[in-house]
Amino acid sequence: MIIRNRQWRYIDLRSASYIGGERRPDVWHGNVSKSLLKLEKYITAMVDNICENADEYNTYVEKNLPYSKRDGIIKRADLNCICPIYRTFDNPARVVGIVKKSDSLPLWSADKMTLRTYMYVWRILYEAYRTHDSYRPEPKSDFANKSDEEVFVRYNSKGDEIKWLNLDSEQDYQKWYDDNSSYHCMDVAYARIHLHARKKTNRWGNENVPVADGSSV
């Protein structure tokens, strides 16, 4: 029997190495089978009671279980009620307006994806992210008079790996991606904001996106 609280602290009470193993007393720590059997009987009865009164149990859990012990998907409105300071906005209408405006913009695509093209788009996103950071924004002067390549090499986790690669070759972009994609090279913000180029093929899966075959988006 293993009891844990979902925070990697647990009690391990076993008289066999696996469920089908032979139960026998531990010669070093004594025979605790009677105590374990009593505990097993109690937990079995408790589980049976929960199964017979599921609605009552769920009501109790909903009222008393700490949120840190719960899994699942909830509405943003419910999350804001539980934790008002978690990713909320001072002006929600403004944020909704920005999202709607973004959705209405035409989709950008390129005939082929190269490192030069990728660096150009990546730099736009990274500069916007860093200069508008609510915690510690960087001044725009940090990026002024710097080329896309200079910004990319300086701030991308694998930007310096573009040395010796042809910036205008689709094959060299693919090589850079294959060699470094496991090391967050596509991240604009580490492990949070990602910029992936995708090439439309016969396995695209969404014909409603207006991108020509062979183009990257």
Image (cartoon, grey):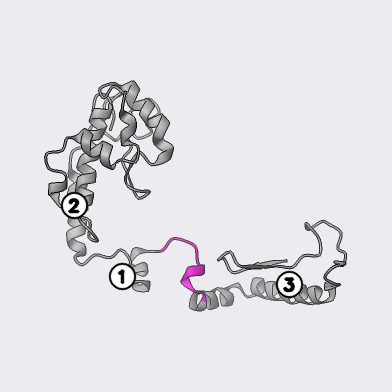
Name the foreground residue: 148 vs 73.
Answer: 148
Q: Is residue 55 above or below residue 172?
A: below
Along the polypeptide, which appears first: circle 3 or circle 2? 3
Which amino acid type corresponds to the residue marked 1 in the rendered image? Ile
Q: Report the residue marked by disc 1.
A: 85
Q: Report the residue marked by disc 3.
A: 44
Whether residue 106 is visible:
yes
Which amino acid type corresponds to the residue marked 3 in the rendered image? Thr
What kind of element bears circle 1?
Answer: loop
Q: Residues within 10 Å of mark 2 (few under 14, many from 20)?
A: some
Q: Residue at x 31, y 29 (%)?
A: 162
Q: Are marks 3 and 2 in contact (CB under 8 Å)?
A: no
Looking at the rendering, the stretch of residues picked out in magenta corresponds to 65-74
Q: Report the residue marked by disc 2.
A: 131
Q: Does the stretch in magenta take in 70?
A: yes
Q: Position of residue 171 (x, y in %)?
A: 34, 21
Q: Is residue 37 above or below residue 75?
A: below
Which amino acid type corresponds to the residue marked 2 in the rendered image? Thr
Marks 3/1: CA distance?
Answer: 41 Å
Whether residue 108 is visible:
no
Q: Position of residue 182 (x, y in %)?
A: 43, 38
